[in-house]
Amino acid sequence: MNSKERVLLALKHQEPDYVPLFEAWIESEIMEQFNGDPYSTRIRLGMDCLPLGNHPSNTNAYKNGIDEWGRIFKDGQYSGGLLKTFRDLEQYTAPLSHAADWFPAKEVRKIRDQYQEEYALFYAWHDCSLGLSYLSMGMENFFLACYNEIELVKAVIDRSTLWTIALVEEAVNNEVDFIVLGDDAADNSRPMISPQMFQELILPEYKKIVKNCSVPIIWHSDGNIESLLPFIIDAGFSGVHSLESKAGIN
């Protein structure tokens, strides 16, 4: 059984020869010890899954400046959100065709040709229906708006979902075996919004994403997500990452 077969069997909730290993993101300092290559690094670390797709040069996301969705980054770190009004929403909505920029044809073809037969290829995107929304608006502003500007919040969440679906569809078109969607929804003690609000605002969006995807999706969130897990199951996700022990999730 090779790595790809092992991963696909696990994603079907069947038992492979051993638990496949996976890492969505690896710090550059670690990769530098393996010549800075995300593929040889993962292979030498015994991983069964390799990434496909990357942040293009024409985005400021996780770099410096204001990105397409109104998020502010400094030295690669998030530092705030600009989206406060419906007019801002019009300004900070990327065209869905922009999703293709995450999958440059020449690079994708090279990776598939080299690794597709033996390893499971995945695409990982952090911040979708919930996370992209609260980071675009700024966290304090978003959570206050959940009570005093709910129509704006719903519109921002809808924008974030449509973008996520565009990315997911592009990833599937480029022959990934599975997708990881990061959407941090909790801190170490509780969800960022109540389970009732999560069910109302986010669960329907997750169902849209899963419905528009023909490969398994693993949902990622840090924190104490226990009260949200029934919704994640209901949405149709194939797996959950990560189970943060410091948040009491064992």
Image (spheres, rainbow, N blue to C red):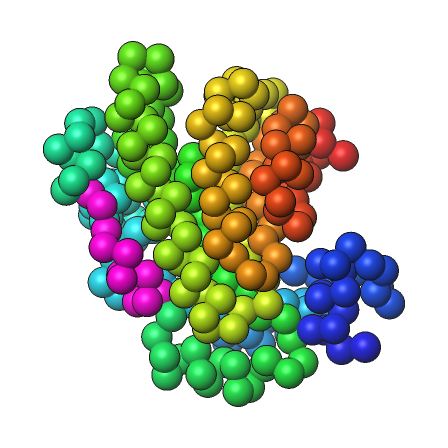
Q: Is residue 26 visible?
A: no
Residue 95, above or below 56: above
Q: Nearer the viewer, residue 5 or 208?
A: 208
Seen in the image, is 141 located left or right of residue 188? left
What residue appears at the point 50 percent right and 41 percent down from the top-left corner? 206
Is residue 98 on the magenta stretch?
yes
Q: Quadrant of the C terminus?
A: top right
> Quadrant location of residue 119?
bottom right
What residue appears at the point 49 percent right and 66 percent down from the top-left corner? 172
> Quadrant location of residue 160?
top left
Residue 128 location in percent, x, y?
Answer: 42, 43
Q: Quadrant of the N terminus?
A: bottom right
Q: Nearer the viewer, residue 139 or 84?
A: 84
Q: Residue furthest top?
A: 148
Is residue 35 on the magenta stretch?
no
Seen in the image, is 47 located left or right of residue 59? right
> Quadrant location of residue 154?
top left
Residue 239 location in percent, x, y?
Answer: 67, 48
Q: Main secondary structure of the magenta part?
A: helix
Q: Is residue 206 visible?
A: yes
Residue 155, above or below 149: below
Seen in the image, is 128 located left or right of residue 120? left
Q: Nearer the viewer, residue 179 or 76?
A: 179
Seen in the image, is 184 located left or right of residue 152? right
* Magenta span of residues: 92-102
